[in-house]
Image (cartoon, helix red, strand yellow):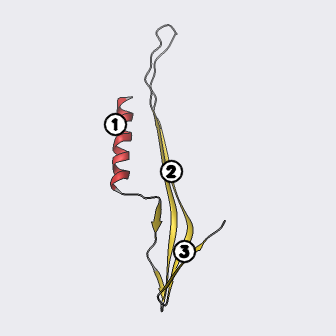
Amino acid sequence: MEHVTRLMAQVKGVLSRSALKDAVVSKPISAGDQHVLVLSDVSVALGAGGGIGSAPAKRMATGTGGGGGGGARARPVAVLVVDKGQVRIEPLGN
């Protein structure tokens, strides 16, 4: 189980150094005097498990284990529009 704890600590460190924030701003998309930046909500989830085993009271008992997984999601929530020096935010969806 200690190896799983070390692995998760290492993954957490990598994510911390990559500085994921609650919102991410895209590179600007420009056309003439208009510029648009997409604002996205970003979330990351990780999980891991472990095991070892041996139950001497039971016949054929041995053990091992392991497992892990993760996922990430980026969802656009608004656009920031710069048009001829004026700035506005346009929400997307609900």
The percent position of residue 46, horizontal first and vertical second, equals 47, 45
Q: Amino acid at mark 2?
A: Gly
Residue at the (48%, 91%) spot, across then down = 33
The percent position of residue 37, horizontal first and vertical second, equals 49, 76
Residue at the (61%, 70%) spot, across then down = 92
Separation of residues labelled 1 and 2 (CA atoms): 19 Å
**Earlier residue among tags 1 and 3:** 1
**Image quarter of the N terminus:** top left
Q: Nearer the viewer, mark 3 or mark 2?
A: 3
- Residue to which mark 3 is pinned: 79
Q: Amino acid at mark 3?
A: Val
Tag 2: Cα neighbours inside 10 Å, few (<14), some, or many (≥20)?
few
As drawn, the label of residue 6 is 1
The percent position of residue 43, horizontal first and vertical second, equals 50, 54
Separation of residues labelled 1 and 3 (CA atoms): 39 Å
68 over 31 or under it: above or below: above
Q: Amino acid at mark 1?
A: Arg
Name the one closer to the observer, 55 or 14. Answer: 14
20 over 84 or under it: above or below: above
Residue at the (33%, 54%) spot, across then down = 17
The percent position of residue 41, horizontal first and vertical second, equals 52, 61
Cβ–Cβ under 8 Å for marks 1 and 2:
no
Horizontally, is 94 left or right of 19 in the view? right
For the residue labelled by badge 2, is the local secondary structure a helix, a strand or a loop? Answer: strand
Q: Nearer the viewer, mark 1 or mark 3?
A: 3
- Residue to which mark 2 is pinned: 71
**Earlier residue among tags 1 and 2:** 1
